Image: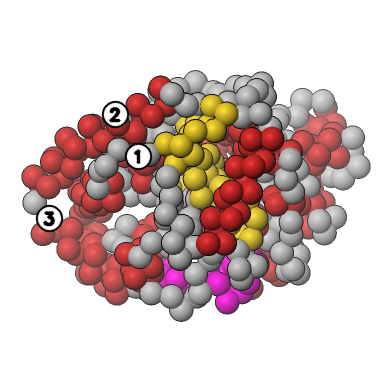
Amino acid sequence: MSEIAFVSIPSLRRLLRRREVSALDVARVTLGALERTGRTLGAVATLTPERAEREARAADRALRAGRAGPLCGIPYGAKDLLDTAGIPTRWGAPPYRDRIPHRDATVVTRLRNAGAVLVAKLAMIELAGAGGYRECAASIDGACRNPWDATRWSGGSSSGSAAAVGAGLVPFALGSETGASLVLPAAFCGASGLRPSFGVVSRHGAMTLAWSMDKVGPLARSAADCGAVLRAIAGPDPDDWTVVRARIAPTPARRFRVGVLATDFAGAPDTGRRFEDALAVLRRGGHRLQAVTLPREDYLSLYDGIAAGETLAAHEEFIRGPAVQALTDPAQRDGLRAYLDRPALAYVRAVQARERAARGIRALFHDVDALVAPTVLTEATPLDADLLAYRRGRRGGNAVLGAIAGIPELSVPMGFGANGLPLGLSVIGDLFAEPTILAIGAAYQRETDWHLRRPQVDV
């Protein structure tokens, strides 16, 4: 039972349906691990034992009656920007420490309907890093430690979600991403993480950072498990008009045309070697690889111009008021206030340029089914790192492509760097191509065991 969160979702589902374990026992063991190890890592915002017991008992009744949903009895954690009725949802920020919503976010409702059991709200960077932040500890819950090395960061802003999955405290968790907030911590913590296409998963009941770029997605042990969660939470929602795609069915395994994004590995030779190893696995699987170069655009500036305007629109009253001073990270406070001086014209110009850039990105998929690249060039940063300097440097990664073009990305573990910390392989698809990238990720994981490796933490 102490290793239950390392079991795949299908395997745990079989154990529950055969009545070899009960949903209530699984929930209690998971809550114990989160209390003991999750709090030590700084991954926990709020445990939800009363709700967990209630939902687990309901799952056991459904299992006995033979009417179990696809995730019946599977425990999970939700990032603390997803509303949960009667349970604090603090957005990781001290000014919102007393915020208690009256209604669940759509994704939380859908997981409950699928039989999943909410055991915790998981820690995050305050306001999902809306203003830019310098400190790993930019959260009401402090710095979230990496389960592979407690002196390293778990990544932001879905810090707690990635750490809890990477440590084997929950079988899956929900995170969110605007720039790199889901796939980067997945890579740092040795988890699999899926940022879906814009328009696939409802954001109703999730804190808004940038409405045209925010996405909610799963972190889990494997690509296959991410797909199982995605199918439970995806689909149109009358409360979110931006969701335009029906639920996504899995695609049969086959050989794909894979574009290898040009990457400069100067200063990151270990990541380059692990990436070449990953490409060798894909070649052995029969996939056809070809070199691909992104169109020349200043993607980061486009992202920044759009995110700044939309963050200000969502949080203007807070930014103008005195409560912004209660944020933990001074750089975040200054960054948010600086948005007030941005001209509206800068946002409009960025939106106009985005359309051209998005067309250029998506044109790559005329010749390939998916793109691959390292999720990030570096291993997890030290807890005392200056994150603004880190972002200005060569951290690598292509997460803002999804923000600009709305396309999905899957990060899966691809080995370890010089310091013994996980590295991630990104599989990027065209809009609504989740089945393709999940199939490639699952095929890669059938031939490797990186996603099965476990950190030495007490669970």
As helix, strand or loop, the secondary structure at mark 2 comes to helix
Q: In the visual, does 46 lie left or right of 179?
A: right
Place of residue 446 in the rendered image (x, y in percent of width and height, measured from the top left): 74, 38
Amino acid type for the residue under numbered disc 2: Arg
As helix, strand or loop, the secondary structure at mark 1 comes to loop
Residue identifier under label 1: 294
Overall secondary structure of the magenta stretch?
loop
Q: Which mark is residue 359?
A: 2
Q: Is residue 275 visible?
A: yes
Q: Looking at the image, which is closer to me, 75 or 177?
A: 177
Q: Is residue 227 visible?
A: no
Q: Kindly identify the residue that appears in the image at 49 percent across and 39 percent down.
A: 260
Q: In the visual, does 387 lie left or right of 82?
A: left
Real-space Cα distance between discs 3 and 1?
Answer: 29 Å
Q: Which comes before the other along the chain, label 2 or label 3?
A: 3
Place of residue 235 in the rendered image (x, y in percent of width and height, measured from the top left): 50, 25
Q: Which comes before the other along the chain, label 3 or label 1?
A: 1
Q: Looking at the image, which is closer to me, 153 or 264?
A: 264
Place of residue 254 in the rendered image (x, y in percent of width and height, measured from the top left): 65, 23
Q: Which mark is residue 342?
A: 3
Amino acid type for the residue under numbered disc 1: Leu
Q: Alpha-carbon neighbours of circle 2 within 10 Å: few (<14), some, or many (≥20)?
A: few
Q: Is residue 392 magenta?
A: no
Question: Toward which corner of the image does residue 284 lie, by quadrant?
Answer: top right
Give yes or no for contact between labels 2 and 3 (Cβ–Cβ under 8 Å): no
Highlighted magenta segment, given as a residue range: 134-153
Compared with 106, 343 (above or below) is below
Amino acid type for the residue under numbered disc 3: Arg
Q: Nearer the viewer, mark 3 or mark 1?
A: 1
